[in-house]
Amino acid sequence: MSDTVPADNLARELLTAAGLAPSGDEVAFFEMMYPILRSRADTIYTVEQGFEA
Amino acid sequence: MSDYPLTIAEAGAALRAHQLSSVELTEETFARADRLDAQLGTYLFRCDESALAAAAQADEDFRLGKDRGPLQGIPLAVKDILSTADCPTTAQSLVLDPAWGQRGDATVVARLRHAGAVLTGKTSTMEFAIGLPDPTQPFPVPRNPWLTTAWAGGSSSGTANGVAAGIFFGGVGTDTGGSIRMPSALCGVTGLKPTWGRVPKSGCVPLASTLDHVGPIARTARDCALMLNAMAGFDPSDDCSADVVVPDYTKALTGSVKGLRIGVERDHHSRAPLVDPSAAACLEAAIDTLAKAGAEVVEVSMSLWDPVNEATIITTFAEAFTYHQANLQRRWADYGVYTRAMVTTGAFYSAVDYVQSQRVRRAGRREVLDLLQSVDVIVGLTAGAGAPPVAGLDFTTALTLPVFTAVWNGLGFPTMSVPIGFTDAGLPVGMQVSAGPWDEARVLAFGDAYQHITDWHRAVPSVAVE
């Protein structure tokens, strides 16, 4: 897993950094989705490193 | 019109036999649209006037002995994410600048017109080819001709449901994670995602530029071959377009699978949740049919399926967010709720995630190229269930739909969905078939041969029977 992946739920901070201002309900949705998406993204780091020439 | 042809090939033969004219054919397709579009949500815009003018020109050309090929005089439609000179282009969004579509015909649209096709209008999609049907937006919700309470699939929704209902004979779709193949499977028609770079994207509103493909949807593999002959080929105005020789795809259509080595990939659908056993049974029946017709069937496995699938999802959202970020900042409320939710998740991935995703995609390509040393094609289910109901579709349910298409976008290899039967609920099921880069001919030949020994592709939904 990449050491750049935040351990905590940083959805709200990432939305702010991206210049976005969703409604409160939508922020709650993104906070719910964030750990799910991050967990799924771990899959790409299961591929053996060093596979590129 | 009781002798109305079903396919591009049949319609072309009827035109050349003077059994009907292109104007008659086009008027009949518009009459069908008049009758069915309110139920199906196929069109965003119709181009009756320019289409009938093109049809009259096709008839005049036939009369003068001028034949521009198999698409001359054939009514086709275009997903409203490609620009056209005679219709607005919206990407089914309130956000897209209307000036975007004022650039004239996209390259593929121009090529189809040059081939004599009659372009009838612009078909429905999801906003910017992502998201879900959104009844809060001022656009039609595309429905399935086999069950109008069900979704047509997406995002080339109107192109697929229009072909299934006989509203036109074929159409142009785009496919970033399955948007040609998934609606084709759910509507019971044939749809081809070519090799990435094979068909130019100039004039196509981007979703994810390293994953976007433009391709044909039609009733048969042969019809897809006829369309691809006109659509494929290098275009210097598209940075992603490849300068690779385009064969005549119809020459590959031998009608036989004898001796063909078919790799069946079951891992992904056999362990995926929510797969309908009756859909999986359709795949097994199709494989049995192919084996009886002389194909050699072997089991194959793609160990990098899951990481490549996830890399494709990350790439989609990261590239889409890059394209939309400025508009999301300024016009958040003008986006549909599903599109802005999905695109915004691109903000949750890092540069490292994106770069690793590209490395995984390359590793996946190497693995599948190795696999294709031992088999000619790889087949599996396009989707593991029939079309879901429109009611209740949301972000969460979309994530759980058993659809197996995105990997092939990440790899960029040509992949086609062909109809292989129906679920126990009477909804169409599709099988996707893939081959190596630039080998659309092999995919089309496989689909055509399968359609020589089956007739699933000729099934017509009752809503379309007068």
Image (cartoon, coloured by chain):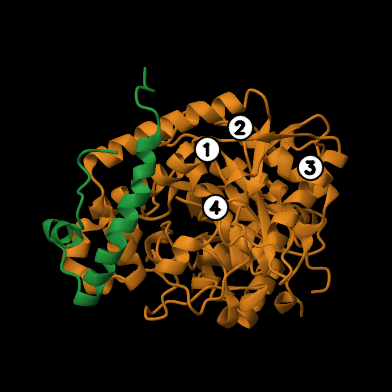
Find residue B449 and name its label: 3
Tag 3–tag 2 contact (CB < 8 Å): no
The kind of residue on which mark 3 rests is: Ala
Mark 4 surroundings: few (<14), some (14-19) or many (≥20) residues within 10 A: some
The kind of residue on which mark 1 rests is: Thr
- Mark 1 or mark 4, earlier in chain: 4
Image label count: 4
Q: Would you name the residue on which mark 4 appears?
A: B113
Gap in angstroms between the C-alphas marked 3 and 1:
21 Å
Q: Would you name the residue on which mark 2 appears?
A: B439
- Mark 3 or mark 1, earlier in chain: 1
User: Quick one: SS at disc 3?
Assistant: helix
User: Quick one: SS at disc 2?
Assistant: loop
Gap in angstroms between the C-alphas marked 3 and 4:
29 Å
Tag 1–tag 2 contact (CB < 8 Å): yes
The kind of residue on which mark 2 rests is: Asp
- Mark 3 or mark 2, earlier in chain: 2
Q: Residue at x 21, y 50 (%)?
A: A7
Q: Residue at x 42, y 76 (%)?
A: B139
Q: Would you name the residue on which mark 1 appears?
A: B195
The answer to whether residue B152 is visible is: yes
Q: Residue at x 53, y 73 (%)?
A: B142
